[in-house]
Amino acid sequence: MNRPVVVGVDGSPSSLVAAEHAARAAVLRSRPLHLVHGYLHPSGYGVPINPYELGIPKPNDEAQSMLDQLAADLADRWPGLTTEVRQVAGGPGATLVEESRRAELVVVGSRGHGGFAGLLLGSVGSQVTAHAQSPVLVVRPTEGPIAVGGPVLVGVDGSELAEVAVGQAADEATRQQTELVLVHVHPPGATDAAEVLDTAAAAVRGSHPGLTVTTRQLRAEKPDQALIDASRDAALMVVGSRGRGGFTGMLLGSVSQSLVQHAHCPVLVAHPYGRAR
């Protein structure tokens, strides 16, 4: 199945930056790019306010023009890119989670307006990053070009789902032809940090021969700030959707919110792929 890279677009600066990252990701993966706009009914819920009105709200002409123009611009900047545009009558969170069931990657901006308002500040962002059936790439507006050349960093804690994050981080580092850095955050006095990192590094070197892999121990009481600081020189930060130890409750509390809002590079929230429908 040729899973596409899906990006939520509403015309805001954040979503346009996200679309640029999504185009690059699609080209690196040799996958099509789907630009998706989730639009709401005037009632705010994506369905008719009157229960006897069973019709689906119509797509917005202005939004369609925005999508078509963006698709044309991206095709000009990324030769070989195949794009598809689509408007979906529904809320942004539910729309992107549903799209993720058939996606290789979902890309979202950290700010938005209209259908994607407050994407990573409230329930919508939590819904997408916590419940997507594919990896989710979170990017923020920036005045500079897409960062390339920096390493891919991934948080490691020895948990089973962290292994998923490490595997997807290794794939990303291979695509971007850059170094993979395995990072383990632990409080002072912890004794198993080296073992956790060595086990993860050995697995990556076995599955991705030729990839440059390094390990880094960070001693800190607060894993979120340590990871934010480590992201300054990175091209990408990859985190697992659940974990233990320093990564407990990654997508349920402050660590997750801190990373997606304050990391100095895009953040990839790793998820196992769901079954396409």
Image: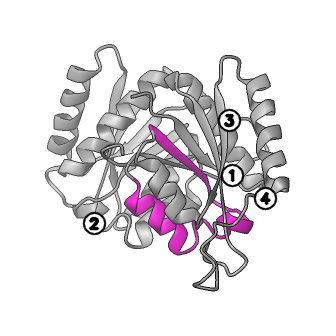
Can I make out residue 104 in this image?
A: yes
Residue 248 is labelled as 2
Do tag 4 and tag 3 residues touch (Cβ < 8 Å)? no
The residue that mark 4 highlights is: 60
Label 4 to label 1: alpha-carbon separation: 13 Å
Indicate the amino acid at tag 1: Val
Q: Nearer the viewer, residue 15 or 62?
A: 62
Indicate the amino acid at tag 4: Asn
Residue 146 is labelled as 3
Residue 120 lies in the magenta stretch: yes
Residue 174 spot, x, y in % from top left: 42, 22
Q: Which residue does the image show at 42% across and 42% down from the upper left?
A: 102
The residue segment tinted magenta is 104-132
Q: Which residue does the image show at 68% across and 81% down from the upper left?
A: 43
Say what secondary structure mark 2 lies in. loop
**Dot placed on the residue nearer the N-terminal end, 4 or 1:** 1
Which-is-in-front pick, marks 2 and 4?
Answer: 4
Above or below 85: residue 251: below
The residue that mark 1 highlights is: 9
Do tag 3 and tag 2 residues touch (Cβ < 8 Å)? no
Label 3 to label 2: alpha-carbon separation: 31 Å
**Dot placed on the residue nearer the N-terminal end, 1 or 3:** 1
Is residue 250 left or right of 99 when viewed as pictured? left
Q: Which residue does the image show at 73% across and 56% down from the upper left?
A: 10
